Each structure stands twice: as structure tokens, then as C-alpha cells.
Image (cartoon, helix red, strand yellow):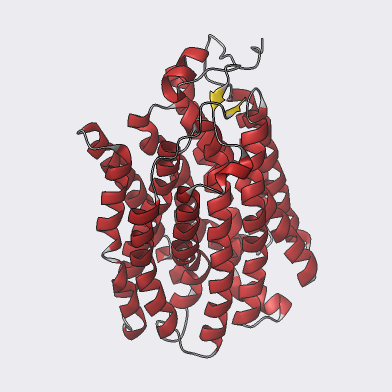
Amino acid sequence: MISPAGTSPARIPPNLRRWLVVAIIFGAMVLGYIDRVTISFLADDIKALFHLTNTGYARVANVFIFFYAVMYPVSGWLIDRFGRGEGVRFLMFGGILVWSLACAGAAFTRVVWSFGFCRAVLGLAEPMAYAAQLRAVTEWFPKKLRATANSLCVAGGTIGMVIAAPFLVGLKETYDWRAAFIVPGVLGVVIALLWVMVYRNPPADVLAENTGGAPGVPTPAFAWSRLWKTRTLWGVILIRFISDPVWYFCLFWFPTYVKSPALGLTERQVGLFGWIPFLCAALGGIGGAVVSDFMVRRGMKPILARKTFLTAIALVMPVFALTPGIANPVVVIAIFSVVAAVCLSWLFNVPVILSETFPAKNVAGVLGISAGFGALGSVLFNEFVGKKFDAGVPAAVFMIMGALHLIAVLVLWTMLRVETPEEKEVKN
């Protein structure tokens, strides 16, 4: 028997259901990241198939990133507007299903425009999962566990990157490059079905404890137009616009860079060792969230704990500028590992700051807007990367990336604060 909207079937206790929700989101994120980075591990095949330079490859990668940027704010608005009741359940289901079909569809393309179309659909569908999962985590988990739960959800993406190298290269070598698109797509359809079967809204008492509100009870929240007048929204937009390009660089250029003549790894070696930075990223992201939650449990104010932790780890980012001068692939992979861990710690903790500075019903919208601008910044930077790599001068790329998180720290401390709507501004 299916329970009415807003209730949780008695056969699954709330404390168990919330971790099942996290587990399914984790699986969706694993496959979502594999789907988005398939082209980075098959870059040589795709460039040969469509006769692309590095700049051309950057533009193919940008098709996904551009539509991802466009759809992220829309996804946040959809979750804020329709997320109550069964909204989160069915919007997440639709997002996972559509992106999985788009991933599988890329295997059947023969010309670059149809391949690009599949990448565009992938970009349009994937943001829904991030907007929906943050709303789900905000409503299902108290603040003392929220960063940990959020990090476990989002870490699925990085675990996807860990799996991606051996998984995709193995599929290609066992079958052909098309299998690397079809198999993850089919698995994504299975995850979508699991989600719609398991997810329910939290019980009223759980929701009230975690967010201060219950279904059907109006609570103060910013109207969409009013969000744009808050200082914190513009602060997080700047933070994501400035810092996200470093992570997107790791996603789409790491395999290409370590296979360049300067380092000379083979495709098989990338399959064997290319997962290491992304495992470090996952461990760093989850570990960072646990540390910042520990700081909160020790009595530090939540937003201060997140800011202090993010500032401390940003101090190591200038090491990235040293990369072009190093010919040892082991050292280069180690540097990428440190950088990736910092990037994921930021990406895991910044959304948690949003859940602690905005009303719960605004969190998905703010995440969508800020992440969209982060992807837009990455589109612009990605074009720059392609041109510099074609010109054989990567040093400028790494020098800029080494400074971006330090600039983001200044914004973090000067612009992010708790935003409280007026009591009369009510959003159901």
C-alpha cells in the first residue's frame, strides 16, 4: 500500500528511510558523474571520430556545461515551486531517467551535432538531481548531520569518477567506445526506478524538527524575485563562478593532461591510475564535511565553522601553479589529488552554508542559481584552456587556477551571512 503524500510507510522507520534516500542519491550521483565525464576518458576516440582539436573538444565539453548552467537555476526554481507533496519524488525520477537515456543515446550518434544534442540533454537533466537532493537532505536531516549526509550524497559523483577510469576504459577495451555510454545509461534507469519506489516525504514531526515547519503550514521564505536582493546570493554566485572552473578542469582535462607528451601516460595507465585524484577528492570532501560538522558539535556557530574550514584548506591551492614544471607523473597525480580534495570540500560545504543561511524552501533555488553561474564560469574558462593547450602554453592555466580559491575566500568572509525574510513574506 502506498502512503498518502507527506507520509512515510510504517514498514520503513524514518531513521532508516533517510539513509536509504542517501544511498539511492549516492548511486544516482555515481552514474551521473560517469555519464558526464565519459568524454574525458574517451577524448582521443571522440576527437578522432569527429576530427576535433583540443579547442573543438573543449567546445563539445562546453555543450554539456552550458546547458547544465542554464538548467541549474530552473531546476532549483522547479524544486522550490513544486517540491512539496510528491514534487521531489517525481522531479528527481524524471531527471535521472532523462539523463540516463541521453547518455545511452550518445552511443548511436554518427555526426558531431547529434552527439552534441545528447550532451545538451544530459546537461539539461542532471541539475535536477542536485536541487532535489539538497531539498531532501535539508528536510530529512538535522543541522548536526546535514553536512555529513550532503557529503555522502554528493560524494557519489566523485566515487563515480573513481570508478570511471577503469570502468569506461575497460568497457571500451572489452567491447567498444559505445558500450561506455550504453551500460551506465541502462544502470541509471534502474536507479530512477528505485528512487520512485523508496522516496517519501519525511513525517511531519521529522520535518518540523529539521526545518521548523510542517507540510501545509506556511513558513516565511523569500519570493524568487526577492532572492536577488540578498547579499548572500550574490556572494555565493561569485564564489561558484570563481572556484568551480578548477573542479571542471579536473573532470574534463585531467586524463588529457597526463596523456600529453610532457607526462606520457598511456590510455591503459590512465585506466589503472586515473582514479586516484578522484578517490582523494571523495575522501577529502566527506572528511571535510565531517570535520566542519564536528566543529559545529563542539559549539562553533555553523556558518563560522564552514567558513573557517574552507579558508584553511584553500591555502594549499597555489601548489597547482607548480604543475607545468613537473615531469614526474607520480608527483603530478599527487598534486591533482590534493587539488581535487580541496575542490570537493568546497563543493560539499558551500551548499550546506546555503541551508544554514536561507529558509529551507529557498535552498534549492539558491543552489540552482549559484551552481548555474559556477558552470557558466567553467564554460568561459574551458574555452581558455582549450586554446592554451592547443598553443602548448598550459602554465597560464595552472597559475590562474592556483589563485581562484583564495579569491573566493575573500568573498566568503565579506558577503555570506544569514538571510531572514520578513514574517509577512510567506511561501507555501
The image quadrant of residue 277 is bottom left
Q: Quadrant of the C terminus?
A: top right
Q: Is residue 190 visible?
A: no
Q: Is residue 237 above or below residue 216?
A: below
Q: Is residue 341 left or right of residue 376?
A: left
Q: Residue at x 79, y 65 (%)?
A: 114
Residue 212: x percent and y percent? 45, 21
Residue occupying the point 47% across, 61% down = 244
Residue at the (31%, 53%) spot, across then down? 310
Instruction: State left or right for residue 301 relative to residue 356.
Output: left
Near-viewer residue (323 or 332): 323
Give above or below for 206 relative to 387: above
Q: Nearer the viewer, residue 345 or 211?
A: 211
Looking at the figure, which quarter contains the N terminus? top right
Q: Is residue 148 left or right of residue 99?
A: left
Q: Is residue 348 visible?
A: yes
**Up-down: is 345 above or below 111?**
above
Query: Measured from the top left, where is residue 306 in percent x and y?
Result: 31, 46
Q: Nearer the viewer, residue 419 or 299?
A: 419
